[in-house]
Image (cartoon, rainbow, N blue to C red):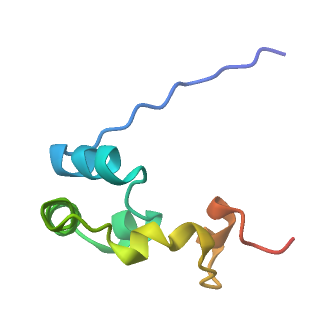
C-alpha cells in the first residue's frame, strides 16, 4: 500500500501572520468557523497594535468548551 502525504501550507492574511509572529500562536479554530476573515483580521490587528494577545485565542488550548473541537487541542476525554 502506498502512503500519500500532502503538505499543508498556512494561507493566512498579513494581519494574522503578524499576530502569530508577535504572540506565538494563531487564532482559535472557532474563529475561522464562526467569524468572517475580516473579523479575524480586525481582532488580530487590534491585538498587535494594542500589544496584548486576544484572550480567547491565547487561552483556547487550555479551555475546555465541551465541543468536538476540544479534541484538536487534546482536551477531549476518550
- The N terminus - image quarter: top right
Q: Nearer the viewer, residue 50 or 35?
A: 50
Q: Name the quadrant containing residue 32.
A: bottom left
Considering every residue shown, the one lying at the far top of the view is: 2
- Residue visible at 48% across and 31% down in the picture: 8
Give the x, y percent position of residue 29. Answer: 45, 63
- Residue visible at 67% across and 20% down in the picture: 4
Q: Is residue 77 above or below residue 16?
A: below
Q: How many marks?
A: 0
Q: Name the quadrant containing residue 12.
A: top left
- Residue visible at 39% across and 68% down in the picture: 33
Q: Is residue 28 above or below residue 67?
A: above
- Residue visible at 75% across and 72% down in the picture: 76
- The C terminus - image quarter: bottom right
Seen in the image, is 18 located left or right of residue 1?
left
Give the x, y percent position of residue 28. Answer: 43, 65
Seen in the image, is 67 located left or right of residue 60?
right
Considering every residue shown, the one lying at the far bottom of the view is: 66
Considering every residue shown, the one lying at the far front of the view is: 51
Give the x, y percent position of residue 67. Answer: 62, 80
Q: Nearer the viewer, residue 63 or 76?
A: 63
Q: Nearer the viewer, residue 50 or 69?
A: 50
Seen in the image, is 3 located left or right of residue 42?
right
Give the x, y percent position of residue 59. Answer: 50, 73
Amino acid at each position: 500500500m502506498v502512503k500519500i502525504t500532502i503538505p499543508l501550507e498556512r494561507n493566512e492574511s498579513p494581519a494574522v501572520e503578524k499576530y502569530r509572529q508577535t504572540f506565538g500562536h494563531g487564532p482559535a479554530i472557532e474563529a475561522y468557523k464562526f467569524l468572517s476573515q475580516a473579523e479575524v483580521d480586525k481582532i488580530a490587528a487590534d491585538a498587535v497594535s494594542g500589544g496584548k494577545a486576544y484572550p480567547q485565542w491565547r487561552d483556547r488550548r487550555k479551555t475546555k468548551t465541551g465541543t468536538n473541537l476540544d479534541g484538536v487541542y487534546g482536551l477531549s476525554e476518550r
